[in-house]
Image: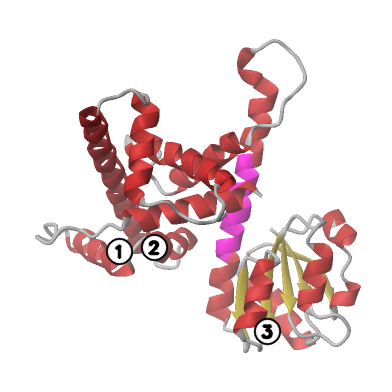
Amino acid sequence: MRFYIVDDDQGVRLMLSDLIEDEALGEVVGEAEDGSLVDPEVLNLKKVDILLIDLLMPVRDGIQTVREIAPHFKGKIIMISQIETKDMIGEAYSLGIEYYIAKPINRLEVLSVIRRVEERVRLQKSIHAIQQTLQVLDFGKSPGPQLKPSSEQNIVTAGRTLLSELGMLGESGSKDLLNMLELLYQYDMESAAPHSFPALKDLFRSLAIRRLGPAAAETDIGKEVKASEQRVRRAILQTLNHVASLGLTDYSNPKFENYASRYFDFTEVRKKMLELQNAAEPSPLPTRINTKKFVQVLYLEAKRLMH
């Protein structure tokens, strides 16, 4: 990964550079002491993957800088500051930053955040490579003008990459989840309230009607809804096992840090880790799976990977 650091404190720049070098996270290809010295053309020329930028700087602050470069810079942005007001943090996220780290800098926190962002960068590069390959191959069709994949195709490609990372792509419920992403994207585009989320039961019902056709009997639709719910639940349980196994192998694994609390209730992850660690029998109490949360997070993460 290629990093660029912007902070008016030379000590902070040195600390971040040393951390990146010591942990073999990548290469620092440039630094600046103020946002006014940041040029998006230079960032792109240096092929910067991750920009670390301070919020408060004397000439042009981090918010202004991000607003200026956002239309042109395609890398990821991590903002660092002593200021933690909700308004400022909210504005920073609205401009597209990935994470917000509070000063004084905590080495472990910065390391964890950078690894998460690196994982996102790698996923996006993987999706781009897949899309380019599909365009070139064109599935054996006769040569002709290359068409840009539709947004529905893109959301499925992003979802497939995430499911692969989560260790559940081979599960039967993965197809249900990918179809849900398509439905949610269509709903998002057509809804008068973007970013709203339909009721989970309505989503499963829409999925069943899509598969069986609008003329299907209610009994058949009901059976398909139950079957789909079971497939998805089994797939999510498999993912829970996968994530717990990652945590047992390496608690600082960036995938574990990123997925454990984001997709699941961490209490359930910890319980599963203890079961695996002690080779114990599963708890008599059923594992609590929040299917709606899992689907929501999967959809939002897939949308972020599209851009």
Looking at the image, which is closer to me, 302 or 252?
Answer: 302
Cβ–Cβ under 8 Å for marks 1 and 3: no
- Which three-letter amino acid code belongs to the residue tagged 1? Val
Q: Secondary structure at mark 2?
A: helix
**Residue 174 left/right relative to 227:** right
Q: Residues within 10 Å of mark 3 (few under 14, many from 20)?
A: some
Q: Nearer the viewer, residue 204 or 179?
A: 204
Please report the bounds of the magenta region as a residue range: 115-127
In space, the residues marked 1 and 3 are separated at their CA atoms by: 32 Å
Quadrant (top left, top right, bottom left, bottom right) of the N terminus: bottom right
Name the residue that disc number 1 marks. Answer: 269
Residue 259 visible in image: yes
Disc marking residue 260: 2
Q: Secondary structure at mark 1?
A: helix
* Label 3: element kind: strand
Instruction: Name which residue lies at 66% across and 21% down.
Output: 137
**In magenta stretch: residue 20:** no
Dominant secondary structure of the residues highlighted in magenta in the image: helix
Could you say where residue 3 lies in the image, as x and y percent from the top left? 73, 65
164 on left or right of 235:
right
Position of residue 180 in the picture relative to residue 123 (left or right): left
Residues tagged 1 and 2 counted as in contact (Cβ below 8 A): yes
Where residue 81 is drawn, which disc sits there?
3
Identified by mark 2, the residue type is Ala
Residue 176, compared with residue 276, is above or below; it is above
Q: Residue furthest left?
A: 284
For marks 3 and 2, give the CA distance.
26 Å
- Residue 21 visible (yes or no): no
Measured along the vertical axis of the image, is residue 171 above or below residue 97? above
Percent from the top left, x then y, of residue 204? Answer: 34, 41
